[in-house]
Amino acid sequence: MNSGRYVLSQVLEHIHWQTLKRLSARYGTETRVRHFGCRQQLICMVFAQLTWREGLRDIVTCLNARPEALYHLGFREPVARATLAEANEQRDWRLWEDLAKGLISQARTLYAGEDLGLDLENTVYALDSTTIDLSLTLFPWADFRRTKAGVKIHRQLDLRGPIPTCIHVTNARQHDVLWLDELVLEPGAFYVMDRGYVDFQRLGRLAAAGAFFVTRAKDNLRFTRHRSLPSDAGTGVRSDQIGKLTLAHSRAAFPWPLRKVHYFDAEAGRDLIFLTNHLEIRAVVVAGIYRLRWQIELFFRWIKGHLRIKHFFGTSPNAVKTQIWIAVTTYLLVAIIHKQLGLPGTLHRTLQLLSVHPFEKMLLHELFRASPVTQGKK
């Protein structure tokens, strides 16, 4: 019999516990706590994410069924449902945001060499948001419409991975474009976004910071062509023009030259108009950068489909943000393990195997080697 550590323990070894302790001291989350600290809370919540638990009672029932495993994970008494609920409701959610940011740095380093499939060395970030519907009765603070509640998760994704680099949770009422005011812009990087982010004053600040954007033009765009660049219909590029915005107030907000690329997407059978402030890369690369934006939708579809952020274990803003950030932490742990071990298949396969073996005493590389690769979901 393997007398090593549990699979769950090996997943959690990528957490720097001293960092968690320092963060706990910063936010004062363990004042007068005797048995159930932040470490125990994190273990419970990561277990819940990995194994798709349905609620607090489900979490504690499954954990307490393995008392010997709990002891080795650092618990000195059974987990109480009320204790876990109180921790999620009251411990400052910013602790989990800061912990996840450390894992983001680790994951980005591992995935930095990923090939984007384009002739491009710049960092490419995708911006997008998703709305999670909530019950207005249970979450009155998140009122969205007359009969609905919801929160909106804004995210920035490094497309070499893809790894989330910035996540912001707001009321569902907030317009997407307002998030551009919160971003710390990286000179030389590309920011790819859909039409909901087209605000020329904000795009002007992005350009002034030395960054580049690729987005789709709105139907009411007024653009004055100054010159045309060669285009190749065989690549899907119908036209490639450089000019400026026509309307006076738009040009005042964005006074720089702007590039408009007309591209025909053969797969979708439709024409697309892209805007970018980068005047030198090939037009087909502009279209390729925008195509990469779909990865951010796949990322969140993955998160919503395979982790627990649609059914919340608490109803306060703090409990909701705690669960979202620990879900992101779980995703990052799976991504780090997948990359470090050079595992075949998809992240979904890696999560599946971890989910059914949390209390096995087997080295991770043996666990994955013993399971044949099959075609899995992304």
Image (tube, helix red, strand yellow):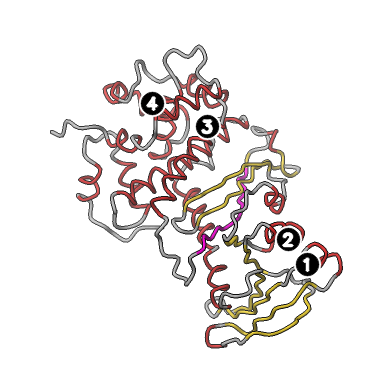
Of mark 3 and mark 4, the one earlier in the sequence is: 4
Which residues are drawn in magenta? 122-133
Q: Determine which residue is flagged by label 3.
A: 313
Report how far apart the C-alphas of labels 3 and 4 lie in the structure.
Answer: 14 Å
Please tell me which residue is depicted at 48% across the width and 23% down the height of the picture: 84
Disc 4 to disc 2: CB gap under 8 Å: no
Q: Quadrant of residue 76?
A: top left
Report how far apart the C-alphas of labels 1 and 4 lie in the structure.
Answer: 62 Å
Of mark 4 and mark 2, the one earlier in the sequence is: 4
Mark 3 or 2: in front is: 2
Image position of 224 with respect to 127: above or below: below
10 Å neighbourhood of mark 2: few (<14), some, or many (≥20)?
Answer: some
Considering every residue shown, the one lying at the far left of the view is: 1
Of mark 1 and mark 2, the one earlier in the sequence is: 2
Disc 1 to disc 2: CB gap under 8 Å: yes
The numbered dot on residue 255 is: 1
Image quadrant holding the C terminus, namely bottom left
Task: Report the amino acid beneath label 1.
Answer: Pro
